[in-house]
Each structure stands twice: as C-alpha cells, then as structure tokens.
Image (tube, rainbow, N blue to C red):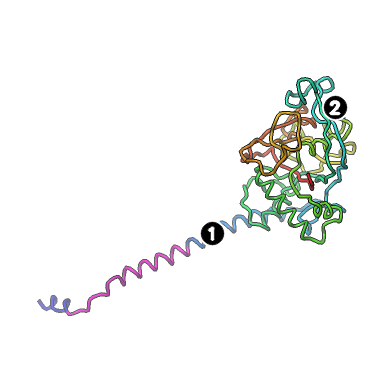
Amino acid sequence: MTQSQDNSSQPEKAPGRTTGFAVLTALVVFTAFWMNYQSSLLETDQSMLAEIAGTTMADGFNSDAWYLPADELLGFVEIPAGTFTMGSDPALDRQAYGNERWSNTRRQGTVDVPRFYIGRFEVTVAQYRAFIEDTGYQFDEQAVSAAPNHPVTAVTWPDALAYSRWLEANLRGSDQTPVELRDLLDSGGHVVLPTEAEWEKAARGTDGRIFPWGSQAVAGNGNFNSAATTEVGSFSCTGCAYGLADMSGNVWELTRSPFQDYPYSPDDDREDLSEDALWVMRGGSFSDSAANIRTAVRGGVDPGVRNGTIGFRVVISSQ
C-alpha cells in the first residue's frame, strides 16, 4: 500500500521526452556513420588516384599542363586542309571489308577535310586522371588502373566527350596554350573527338596507304597481336603519316561519327545526334590481327560500352 502511494506521488514523465531523445541519438549516430562512410569512399578514390599519381611519369609529359606532351604544341599535330582518298579498293587491298567500300560501283571516294590539329598520342591514364581530379567526374576503376602513360580504356563515348570539353575549357583559359591552337579555338574550333574522315586522313595521309607506314603490316610499327596495351608512343614509326603514334593498334579510338554506310558525308558528324546510335571507332587494338589495324577499317560501338580495348584521342577542329 505504501509502495503504491509512493509510486503515485512521483511526477509523471513529460510525454515524448524519452522518445525524442532516442530519435535525436539515432540521428546523431546515423549522421556520424554516413559521414564516415562517405569519407571512406572519398579516401578510397583519392588513395587510388594517389597511387597512380605516385607512379613515375615518363619524360616528355608536362604535369603543369594537364599531363599533355611537353612540346611546343602540347602534343598536337597540324593536319593541313585538303583532299584525301577514303575507303578501300579490294583490287589494292585484299583484306578490305565490305563496309569500307564507297559503293557497289565506286570503291573509294575523295573527301575534302579542313585544317585541324590532332593529338600525337592517344589520351593517357594520367591525362584522364587529371580530368577526374579537377572535376570529380565519376569514373570506372578500370579506366585508371593502367600505368600513367598507357592509353586510358574502359571509357564510354560520353566520357570521352566530357574529357574533351574539360580540356577545351582549360586550353581556352590558360596562358600556356600555344598561339596556333588558341587561334583555331577563337575562330570556332573545339576540342572534340575526330570525325572518321579526320581520323582516316591523319592515319593514312594523302597517298592512300593501307597502314600508317605503308602497304604491309610491320610488327615493329604498332602494338597488335599482343596481350595488353603499351605506353603511348612505344613504337618508333618515323614513316607514319604526320608522325602520329599508335594510329594502328594499342586501342580502338572513338570518333564522333555515327556508323553509317558509305558514301561518307560531313553532315553526318554531329555531336547532338542521339546517344543511342552506334559510333565509329578506328585503328584496331593490341588484341587485333593485322587485318583489323588497317587505316580504312571501321568498327562500331554502342555509346555506353566500356571495354579494355577501346580508348580515344582528341582533335581541335572547326568542322
């Protein structure tokens, strides 16, 4: 009886006070957990990028200029305006595929290409990493898993365009940009993926060669029939058109041309085309045979595909 009276004389607990305290405690614990989780993700990404950054870069690349080549034009090579022969004539190239022919009655076509600049090398892991670090762009681990001077792979078509736009913004805003490149940018040029006509002209020149170096496959001039990528520019190809490296082999290179039958039309090369189209890729990869690294070979890829044999290089073009 006394115990009952004592209990009844105690003040009643404020309604909801215990519940509110519990909810507040749970929120604090959850917030701490979430921040720790996000921090761990950031540390993982930064750790991965730091590991790559700690790998020694080969001579010839400028860490203060987005890891572009340390030469007068930041690794860009001028391709003069003019015509070239596009496509394959089976009478001259017995390995030619059907989609390389201009038409049933005409084996090859002549295409006039305005002046543009193209990267001497494929875009590297270090260059793509600089883009990621600067923008926080979401990336696939495979894209940055190779050594810094290897070509970046496992990037989608939109990824390549995003990198191109970032590099253009940096070139426009930097006093390190060579006058020649700035003049083209100021006159309507953009950093983009090449059209397949730009790519093919840069690869084969104006004399219709089957490979960048001539009419026969030469093992020492490119990375093909192998198991993995190599550092960009690993193969000396002094006879290659315009002195470009790895236009045959190493990685397939994305273009901004939709995959369509010949004859080729510059009007087909529009960046605002629907991203559900197949896009042309050129050059073959390390895993391909000699037949697939010819300058006229055309591959097609879905824009969302990530593959360890596909990369890209960029151009500065007004087209």
Disc 2 marks a residue whose amino acid type is: Gln
Task: Report the front residue among 182 and 156.
Answer: 182
Q: Where's the C terminus, which quadrant? A: top right
> Could you tell me which residue is drawn at 69 percent across and 54 percent down?
131
Residue 185 in the image: state x and y as whole percent.
Answer: 80, 53
Q: Is residue 22 magenta?
A: yes
Residue 100 visible: yes
Disc 2: which residue: 216
For label 2, the SS is loop
Report the span colored magenta: 9-32
How many marks the image carries: the answer is 2
Above-or-below relation of 239 to 179: above
Foreground pick, 114 / 69:
114
Residue positioned 77% across, 60% down in the render: 173
Residue that appears at 82% across and 41% down: 245
Mark drawn on residue 38: 1
Give above or below for 6 relative to 91.
below
Q: Quadrant of the N terminus?
A: bottom left
Helix, strand or loop for disc 1: helix
Indicate the amino acid at tag 1: Gln
